[in-house]
Image: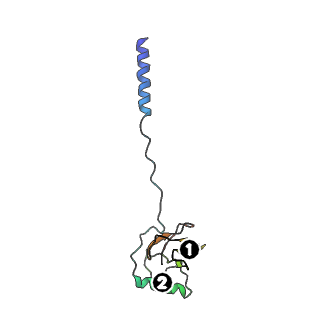
Amino acid sequence: MNKAIHFIAVLSFAAMLNGCSPPPPPPAPYFIPNPPYPPQPIDPAVVQTSQASGVDGASASQPAVGSSIGEYPMAKPTSKSNQVVSPYEPYHIIDVTGFGPGQLARDPSNRKIFRIP
């Protein structure tokens, strides 16, 4: 009987040790950039050209003809220096405090990336 109690005690101790293992690591976050390719450096002369084409009536959400892969549409400035109008529908006004001209930002309503004017 003494051996049976000893065996049960060892078995329960082994079960407790097995339950003390650390939990498995959480899965990696699922994120696909929009678009999936990195942005290309911009030339200030090109930025001026794309802003001018948006003023002439061309859609600001579509890149200018001849633009290379990785360029993002330019947001439209508002009367306030820290707010811009998103180049994507539904064209929300977005607070860009802390962002500089030419930097990339993301529209929180549709998760699309655009460039700050």
Looking at the image, which residue sits at the far top? 1
The secondary structure type at the circle numbered 2 is: helix
Mark 1 is on which residue type? Tyr
Along the line of sight, the residue nearer the viewer: 56 or 81: 81
Vertically, is 21 above or below 12?
A: below
Could you tell me which residue is drawn at 42 percent across and 32 percent down?
Answer: 18
| Disc 2 residue crowd, few under 14, some 14–19, many 20+, Cα 10 Å | some
Label at residue 50: 2
The secondary structure type at the circle numbered 1 is: loop
| Residue placed under numbered mark 1 in the picture | 88
- Colour scheme of this structure image? rainbow
Residue 76 percent coordinates (x, y): 53, 79
Along the line of sight, the residue nearer the viewer: 97 or 7: 97
Which quarter of the image is occupied by the N terminus? Answer: top left
Residue 58 percent coordinates (x, y): 55, 85
Looking at the image, which residue sits at the far bottom? 56
